[in-house]
Image (spheres, helix red, strand yellow):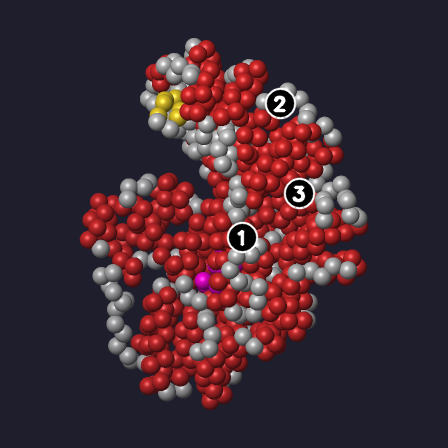
Amino acid sequence: MVTSANPVRGPAQPELGPSLPEGVRVRILRTAHGDRRAAAELASALTERQLTGLDPLPAQPPVLLRAYRQEVRALPDTTRRLLLLAAADQYPVDTHAFLRAVTATRLDTRPLVTAEVAGVAHATAGGIVFRDPWTRIAAYETASVTDRRAVHLLLARVLRGEGESPRRSWHRGAAALGPSRRLAAELRAAAHTARTAGDHALACALVERAAALSPEPSERARLLARAAADAWRSGDADRARRLVAATDDDALGGLLALRAGNATDAFDALLTAAVRYAQDGPGSARTDHPQHAAVHLLARATEAAIYTGDLRRCREAAAVADRLGIVPPGTLGGLAAAFEGRYDDARDLLKAAAGRCGPGGDPTLLIHSGIAALMLGDHTAAATATVRAAASARAGGDGVTVPQAMEFRAYADFWTGRPRAAEAATLEALRQAYTTGQDNGACHLQAALAMFAAVTGDEDVCRERAEAARSYALARGLGLPAALALFALAFLDLSTGRFAASAARLRALAGFGPGHGHRAIRHIATPHYVEAAVRTGDTRVARAAHADYDHWARTVRSPDDLALSARCRALLASGAEAVEHYRTALDLHASGTRDFERARTELLFGGALRRLRHRTEARDRLHSALEAFEHFGSPQCAAAARTELRVLGEPVSPVRGADDLVARLTAQQLMVARMAADGATNREIAARLLLSPRTIDHHLRGVFARLGIRSRIELVRLLGEG
């Protein structure tokens, strides 16, 4: 509880510098428990590698804690002993045993009044509430080792309830005087119980303490690696990295690099570790199941290769798997086969993987199932698998996997025409990715948000997010998000009539190599490339790209892919031949799920019919497309449909629902408007949307212009009336 009597803090909270990368800023605030003074102190001490997110952040602000310790030391001894008991009950493991300990020992709690007067802590019916986490830590760390041991033993003695054994073991371990095989074994068992219950943060604390009590160095290193894995699954990436640094476990280091480091380095570390585990026999010192670990690491290595878009490394992983007699998981094997152009093999592997998307199950396997379904063009199955992956991860306390599922859920939402609904979910996943230290995943989500912004007409947001994603991706060798961000910019150009710029960007997707291009994105962008190329009259490269796309579509037999291939043929043809291809495309769309692309096909078909003077059918197609684009919230595409209708001489109604705020504002503008009406400042809105304050200011000016108002007061009134 923060009080005005606090002598340590000033009245104003310092701001973090604007040059901090977003992921580092979010994690600093988490490490600082939201205290901006502590965050500013931590930020000022960061090294170059910490600033770029490659090294773990410092755990505590030493200057702030020094002041807090002095404040606690100034209290009477009886007050400090009560605060120590409360702090040990809450830090670093919350055990909820303070009141029982007080009752069991008949402690006099009247000295707590002194702490309350000093503004350090106060008593409630549920126990002691500290002013903030740093005060609690100071209360614990200022005590002597002897006093700490005494309170831990007391808390262990009163923790006898059902399900309390892991926390009892924690206090027993914390009270230990030195190495103990017996206590280390007890802590390992308690950690297993906590892990099974989905409490990975508690499991991490228990295993880390077991490592400290283990007399054997090899066992200590193994336990620290296990603690690092638990810290990672709990979402504490910085703690995981600090623990990994104390071991020689390059396998876990590679896994962390896959999510937050250089993907090429991650591939090399993971592949090396996979080979080493595969060569271990039963009873390996590293793990009880070396072959299982080798399969897992090889799958992750292939995942890293695919994330980079590096075909050479995909082939290298496949060759190593073949040499070791390991069959990589179906999704990863299927993607590697698709990268190599072995489409029949890819189809069979992906279909087998996509079928494993039932309820429950391993979240990572469900994510891979969703990826396989995306590649096969089954966006309904992809959405189902990724939603189930997120639910399964949450149920198991594995928050780190939730944003990973959303990385691929975003594709399904985009293609099925739900950009507005998906944007909020993707933004929340972006926050989770940053908070859990998954900056590579955050980069992918930024690129997805750029794609949503391109569809919904938020040009400034599209450019800001796309440039942020590309800048980060090119520095880390991440071909997938770099290519998706480029596709977002190309789609924005295409939908606003900048056809030459769009074609140039989409041609660049054919560039291949770490951090530059990606065959999967090049594939899904091909129909848009063909459209842009036809508009500019340069179709030589586009025809070759379409041939490859058509080969894939015919192999997997996805109705939407076949429909888009037919649309490409229509664009590359003329006259009656083009009309027949458009009709074929729309027939195929009727069996698919990409409603947004169906509307774009109708727009292109309507334009072709107008040029052939088939006015009645052209009008019907264009009105249908216009209605769909308004439903999807895609203003540029809607404007293109209106333009075609005006050329036909068709009266066009004003924007649907002119009195409806949702119709008059873009998705991002509406979100900004609602936050501003709730009283948030531009800086607060920027922090919540993970955008710059400059972009928020631009959005608010756009909101005022579109609504014909001049102030936030008018905005509050207008939103209230709406």
Which is nearer the N-term, disc 3 or disc 1? 3
State which quadrant residue 256 falls in: top right
Work out which quarter of the rendered image holds the N terminus and state it.
Answer: top left
Look at the image and give the residue range highlighted in magenta: 403-414
User: Is-magenta flag for residue 701?
Assistant: no
**Residue depth check, mark 2 versus mark 1: number of the one nearer the observer:** 2
Q: Nearer the viewer, residue 86 or 233?
A: 86
Q: Residue at x 49, y 36 (%)?
A: 162
Q: CA distance from mark 3 to mark 1?
A: 18 Å
Q: Residue 255: horizontal and vertical position, in percent?
A: 64, 47
Q: Give the left or right position of residue 69, taking residue 479 as reference.
A: left
Identify residue type, mark 2.
Ala
Q: Secondary structure at mark 1?
A: helix
Q: Nearer the viewer, residue 98 or 318?
A: 98
Give the answer, above or below, for where 370 lies relative to 573.
Answer: above
User: Is any atom of residue 245 visible in this view?
Assistant: no
Element type at mark 2? loop
Give residue 197's position: percent from left, percent from top. 53, 43
Residue at 39 percent of width and 20 percent of height: 120
Residue denoted by label 2 = 176
Specify few, some or many for label 3: CA neighbours under 10 Å numbering under 14, 14-19, or 20 or more.
many
Q: What amino acid does circle 3 point to?
A: Gly
In the image, is residue 404 part of the stretch drawn in magenta? Answer: yes
- What residue sits right under mark 1 in the picture? 404
Is the residue marked by circle 1 packed among few (<14), some (14-19), or many (20+) residues within 10 Å? many
Circle on res. 263: none
Q: CA distance from mark 3 to mark 2?
A: 30 Å
Quadrant of the rendered structure where residue 648 is? bottom left
Dot 3 or dot 2: first in sequence order is: 2
